[in-house]
Image (spheres, rainbow, N blue to C red):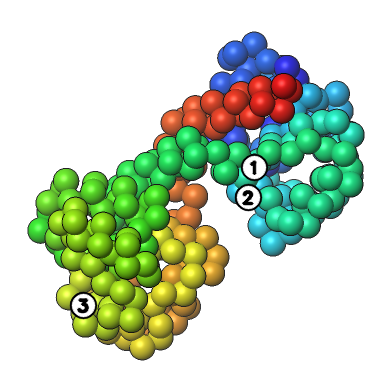
Amino acid sequence: MRFAVIGGDRRSAALAGLLHADGHRVRSFALEQAALDPEIGRESCLQGCVYGADCVLLPCPAEKAGYLNAPLSAEKIPMPQLLEALWPGQLLLGGRFSEETLTAARKGKLLTADLLRRPELAVGNAALTAEGALSRLMEHSDRSLWRSRVLVLGWGRIGSILTRRLQGLGALVSVAARGRRDRAMAEALGFRAFAYEELEHCLGDMDFIVNTVPARVLTEGMLCLIRPEALLLELASAPGGFDRELAQNIGLQILFAPGLPGETAPLSAAELLKKAVYAAVEEMEE
């Protein structure tokens, strides 16, 4: 197949290499700061990259605030401009497309698939994110995770995997979750569990706090209860679980690390992406 890999981080660069190694023709755009195999074409314009491509691969997530997600490029490409360059019938794969992008893609007669909706990729990414989170916590604190008090906000894929990994390292883990069923499951697995409105009673005891929820679950008053020596790790996408500017202004230690697989395990993340791409292409061609 002929693939056009556009934008993204080190995951996208590694994915381009894996597809090329499998014998596909691969061209790239908006990856000029990435290390790529010399045989992978680096196109100077968007139209040249997508011309003749069977499948156009965008990042996961594909866009941020209406623009292509392209941290390894100086290009700032509005999504409507990108879609206008594509041809009817082309396959467009990426992650977390906006409704505006999907509507425009349908009007342009593109065949789209959201890779992050594939359970195998979502769960695999969660596992890689949890591993990367452990690395960040250990790297940026003088305190060991063993016997430390850690609060994980959220009991989704990432939160539930991360709590088990922390427990395996000897951390004293607590969980905050909205749903009663989630809290009951966390307690059944040996964790202390709190509703968000109960956090005021425990925040002052924590050495580490990790947020996985893309919604403000820590209020301004709650932030004031956190000890200055505690470390807050933000894994969720915007708006995140707390006001970062306020947290910094009151002297809290913050790490902002969405998209961790692209930083800590880009090759493993690309291998997961490749499997998802092949499965999506096969389904769309049936």
Q: Are marks 1 and 3 in contact (CB under 8 Å)?
A: no
- Few, some or many residues within 10 Å of mark 3 (<14, 14–19, 20+): some
Q: Are marks 2 and 3 in contact (CB under 8 Å)?
A: no
Point 89% across, 43% down: residue: 108
Q: Position of residue 82 (x, y in %)?
A: 82, 45
Seen in the picture, residue 275 relative to 137 is either above or below; the reply is above
Which quadrant, please, contains the N terminus? top right
Which residue is under mark 2? 96
Which quadrant, please, contains the C terminus? top right
Q: Nearer the viewer, residue 186 or 31?
A: 186
Work out whether residue 75 can be spotted. Answer: yes
Q: Are marks 1 and 2 in contact (CB under 8 Å)?
A: yes
Counting residues from the start of the chain, the first of labels 1 and 2 encountered is: 2
Q: CA distance from mark 1 to mark 2?
A: 6 Å
Point 54% across, 26% down: residue: 275
Residue 281 in which image quadrant: top right
Using the image, tell me which numbered label, if any, was put on residue 114.
1
Counting residues from the start of the chain, the first of labels 1 and 3 encountered is: 1
Point 24% across, 77% down: residue: 203
Q: CA distance from mark 1 to mark 3?
A: 39 Å
Q: CA distance from mark 2 to mark 3?
A: 34 Å
Looking at the rendered structure, the secondary structure element under dot 3 is loop
Q: Position of residue 109 (x, y in %)?
A: 87, 39
Work out whether residue 4 can be spotted. Answer: no
Q: Is residue 119 left or right of residue 70?
A: left
Which residue is under mark 3? 202
Looking at the rendered structure, the secondary structure element under dot 2 is loop
Seen in the picture, residue 169 relative to 236 is either above or below; the reply is above
**Amino acid on which the number 2 mark rests in the picture:** Arg
**Amino acid on which the number 3 mark rests in the picture:** Cys
Q: Is residue 213 left or right of residue 209?
A: right
